[in-house]
Image (tube, rainbow, N blue to C red):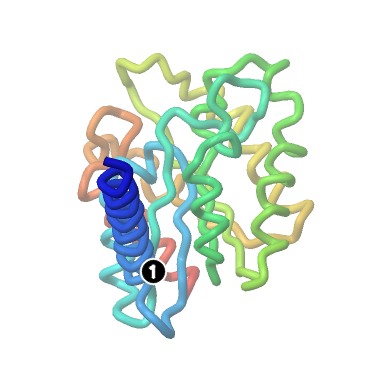
Amino acid sequence: MKNSVKWFGAAVCIVVLAASLTAFFFETQSVAPNTTRVACVGDSITRDTDYPDILSTMLGANYTVGNFGVGRTTVSLDFNKPYMNQPLYQEALRFNPNIVVIMLGTNDAYLSEQQRSNFINDYKVLIASFQSLSAQPEIYIVIPPPAFNNTMGLPPTILDDEVIPLVNQTAAELGLPTIDIYTPLLGNPQAFKDGVHPNTEGSQVVASEIYKAII
């Protein structure tokens, strides 16, 4: 009986080890060797739109594009779902990207002015965490797209008048390049699925602007 238990325990260990090695194998194989790693960091405008896939196609085989977007997340830490508290943020750091494209801020428009009071400092902490990586990545700050009439309660005027200036100020203080997807999508509500998230047409615009900046 003892031998049976020992053999069973050994078998379980082997299965667990094999599963771990398999997961590791597929995880490491997801990044093609000798490619430039691009991390797309953001909220649902990154996670739930086509732009990262379109960008990957545009950049071609010499680039590996990772989608690290998390829906409903904010720059501001004074909220129940800051981006920096999400597991995918840690995965983005482990990805050790050569290029980081950050598009956050849209959900910060939901917050009160008090909750956004540390927006710039919080954004700088997020950026610094990528700057400290061994790959020493290039970092691009994306100006979020405009918001149109929507059923999600997102206030376009707060996004335009309060959040986007904070995004621009953060980039200016750090001397980082910005990618403006706001302007080419302004006055183009048909490029959105719901007034907030770009559809395929809008995602093409987003990907094209980011592609031009990278290339």
Q: Is residue 88 above or below residue 82?
A: below
The reply to whether residue 200 is visible in this rendering is yes
Most distant residue in the bottom direction: 34
* Residue 157 x/y as whole percent: 52, 23
Q: Is residue 103 above or below residue 116?
A: below
What kind of element bears circle 1? helix
The reply to whether residue 205 is visible in this rendering is no
- Most foreground residue, 125 or 59: 125
Name the residue at 64% across, 42% down.
167
Image quadrant occupied by the N terminus:
top left
Name the residue at 68% across, 42% down.
123
* Residue 133 x/y as whole percent: 67, 65
* Residue 26 x/y as whole percent: 30, 65
Circle 1 sits on which residue?
28
Viewed as shown, does residue 50 lie left or right of 166? left
Viewed as shown, does residue 137 lie left or right of 147? right
Q: Amino acid at mark 1?
A: Thr
Name the residue at 23% across, 42% down.
199
Q: How many marks?
A: 1
Name the residue at 66% across, 46% down.
126
Quadrant location of residue 151? Answer: top left
- Most foreground residue, 113 or 12: 12
- Most foreground residue, 105 or 212: 105
Q: Residues within 10 Å of mark 1 (few under 14, many from 20)?
A: few
